[in-house]
Image (cartoon, rainbow, N blue to C red):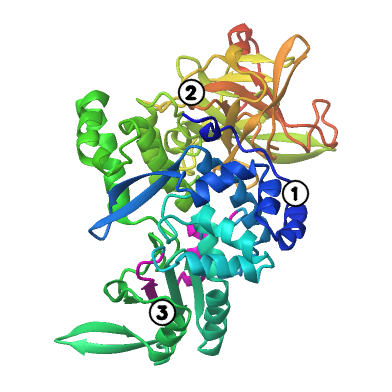
Amino acid sequence: MAKRDQVNDVEPLGTDAHLREAFPRLMTRWDVARLLRVDSKDLHYWCYRNGARYREFQLPKKSGGYRTISAPEGGIRLVQRKLCQILNAIYVPRHSVHGFVPIKGRGILTNAEPHVKQRWVLNVDLSDFFDSIHFGRVRGVFERFGAGPDAADLMARICCFRGRLPQGVPTSPVVTNLVCRSLDRALQAFAKTHRCAVTRYADDITLSTGRAGFDDAVVSVKHDEGRRVAEIGHGLRFLIESHNFSVNESKVRLSGTLDRQEVTGLIVNRKKNVPREYVRNVRAMIHAVERYGVGEAERVFHDRFSRSRRPDLPAADFLRALRGRLEFIRMVKGDHDATFVSLWNRAARFHQWLTPRIVDLSHVEQALWIVESEVATQGVSIRRHGTAFVLKDVGLVTAGHCVGERMRIWHPTRPAERFPARIRALCTASDLCVLEPPPRDRLPALDRGDAGTVAEGVEIGTAGFPDEPVKVAQLEGRVSMIRLRFGHRNLFPSFETRKGMSGAPLLDARLRVVGVVLYGPDRSPSGEEDRVPSSAVAIDLIDELPKFTGSSPALLT
């Protein structure tokens, strides 16, 4: 490899403000080389003596056919990555543009958002998007941003290959956005005139409306043997073609509320969602591992999908691919979606990088009970409640301060069935209590974890009955600190528990009990109404509880 082709990491060329100020002052090739921090002789070799090396290969398209990828190699790729910094600094995207923009948070989700729950969605694809942007257009857009002819010519040569904008080059996405700035402005004005929403993601343009239909300038609808056929309206077609692009007629699609409305791969009929077939494929991948093992599932996966990968990359890693698909479902559906949680937890049984999601509380909720008792305050008897849970091989565990007169325990699924509570073990110093479990067969119980392995920063969660004693609330966070109190190990979560959650289980990432919630922000250990951090006592202390003997208010029924 020649010395000029040795690629190092790209260092920042300056702040965005500095690069925006410097771009209009680029007049000569030496100005460009100086800003890019590259030897001008190397730039001349790559751009004017055909010294740049590209490797071309083809990838199959989803819609059929193949897409040609031109991957740069050596020093030209480093220069393109540096130039990409400059172009991202000078590009200010319009609000309708969501693909490959230097604004954090924009992507396929924000591109789909304006089209959710609309009556009509129109998908338009630009034909031969990258190939239609030739060398002259790229050079012209650099000149419009203030660069001199020589500097613009050099930067266009850096970005183009064989006179066209290639796919696979770091600068290509931002260059397409720069070229499409006038198109984006015209699309926004067009959409405003015809009262519809518009977004663009690369070569995908989407328009939608909540009205009974689009104006004829947007789309015209014909019916052929009962089948709806959509044609781009004359106004929209003229707008696109006047900006030197063309419409891919085979990808024009008009969808109503009774059709599947899809925008950049997401379903938008009622909410942003993942296509059913995508979820089915992920479920099939997990099922294959559960039935045949990782090795056989990975072999089938390689046979089916590795052909569509770049030839220079190693074979696709099955478990990495599975996690990527799960992360995509989470991004779209959210952490608390039941479908995502179910798939994630199934994969966590064999995937070494995954831990079960705490948000899957179906098993935890069955083990939770409500503890009710009476406490006298200033001569007045007040009814209060707390949370308890069945711990395997231990009993019904709760906080000691939940013990009181006429104590009852009941499950939220059977509120009419209440049992008198009887104490097995109690320690007022640690504020822990173990009750006799209710007289039921096969009580769902939680497993005990090792609290000694819990350190600061570890992911934890809890579930209990705050305020309304029939609705489970869940909290997630991390261990913010660990302190010793009266010789006992107390865990302080990053979340704040609420009144009624005393006695709730503190769960690790595998839904095992590592502690018992004691105090929330509205109650201190002394009983005063001041704000103290939520805390829990480590579950290890349960082994040190003295057996309860003698009379107890809990036994007075």
**Percent position of residue 189, x then y:** 57, 84
Mark toward the viewer: 3 or 1: 1
Q: Is there any visible trace of residue 422 in the rendered image?
A: no
SS for dot 1: loop
Q: Is residue 556 magenta?
A: no
Residue at the limit of the structure toward the bottom, as seen here: 216
Of the residues tagged 2 and 1, which is closer to the observer?
1
- The amino acid pointed to by label 3 is Arg
Crowdedness near tag 2: few (<14), some (14–19) or many (≥20) residues, C-alpha within 10 Å = many
Q: Amino acid at mark 1?
A: Thr
Residue 525 circle label: none
* Nearer to us in this view, 316 or 116: 316
Q: Amino acid at mark 2?
A: Pro
Q: CA distance from mark 3 to mark 1?
A: 44 Å
**Image location (x, y in percent) of residue 287:** 25, 35
Mark 3 and mark 2 lie on one chain; the one further toward the N terminus is 3
Q: Compared to 114, does 555 lie above or below?
A: above
Q: On residue 15, which mark appears?
A: 1
Q: CA distance from mark 3 to mark 2?
A: 55 Å
The secondary structure type at the circle numbered 2 is: loop
Mark 1 or mark 3, which is nearer the start of the sequence? 1
Image height check: is 484 above or below 299? above
Quadrant where the C terminus is found in the figure: top right
Tell me the crowding category of disc 3: few under 14, some 14 to 19, or many 20 or more residues within 10 angstroms, Cα based. Answer: many
For image coordinates 83% across by 26% down, the residue present is 526
Q: Residue at x 83, y 36 (%)?
A: 531
Q: Which mark is residue 119?
A: 3
Q: Quadrant of residue 153?
A: bottom right
Q: Which residues are magenta?
A: 105-129
